[in-house]
Image (cartoon, grey):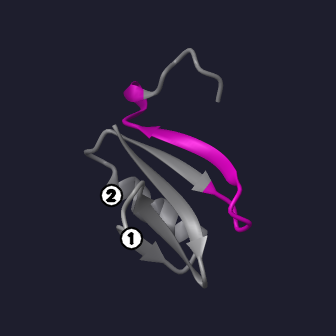
């Protein structure tokens, strides 16, 4: 399973694969990057960690949902 992060970078938001040098997608707002991210991961098996404006971790989403470990909290 690939791991991605949604983070604010300067004046835009990025979706970046863990360990990658460049973002897979960049959008001006967090809501736009979340929407684009959901389309981007549609046919992938990934974990996406979403961070707030301050860079702190907020939530993790697993795609497809069937890949989510059901017994883990969150």
Q: In terms of sequence position, does the residue under pointer 1 or pointer 2 come before the other?
A: 1
Q: Name the residue under label 2.
A: 40
Point out which mark residue 51 bears: none
Residue 22 % position (x, y):
37, 72
Q: Name the residue under label 1.
A: 25
Name the mark nearer the viewer: 1 or 2. 1
SS at circle 1 = strand
Magenta-drawn stretch contains 63: yes
Q: Give the range drawn in magenta.
A: 51-67
Foreground pick, 55 / 69: 55
SS at circle 2 = helix
Residue visible at 57% across and 42% down in the picture: 60
Say whether marks 1 and 2 touch (CB < 8 Å).
Answer: yes
Residue 73 % position (x, y):
65, 23
Q: In which quarter of the image is the C terminus?
A: top right
Residue 54 % position (x, y):
74, 66
Residue visible at 36% across and 35% down in the picture: 64
The image quarter containing residue 39 is bottom left
Label 1, label 2: how far apart the Cα atoms are: 9 Å
Residue visible at 46% across and 61% down in the picture: 35
Residue 26 % position (x, y):
44, 75
For mark 1, does the 10 Å Cα neighbourhood hold few (<14), some (14 to 19), or many (20 or more) residues? some
Q: In this view, does 6 lie above or below 47?
A: below
């Amino acid at each position: 399973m690939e791991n991605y992060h949604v983070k604010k970078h300067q004046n835009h938001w990025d979706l970046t694969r863990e360990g990658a040098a460049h973002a897979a997608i960049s959008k001006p707002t967090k809501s736009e990057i979340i929407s684009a991210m959901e389309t981007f991961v549609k046919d992938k098996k990934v974990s996406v960690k979403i961070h707030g404006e301050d860079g702190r971790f907020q939530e993790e989403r697993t795609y497809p949902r069937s890949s989510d470990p059901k017994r883990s909290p969150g």
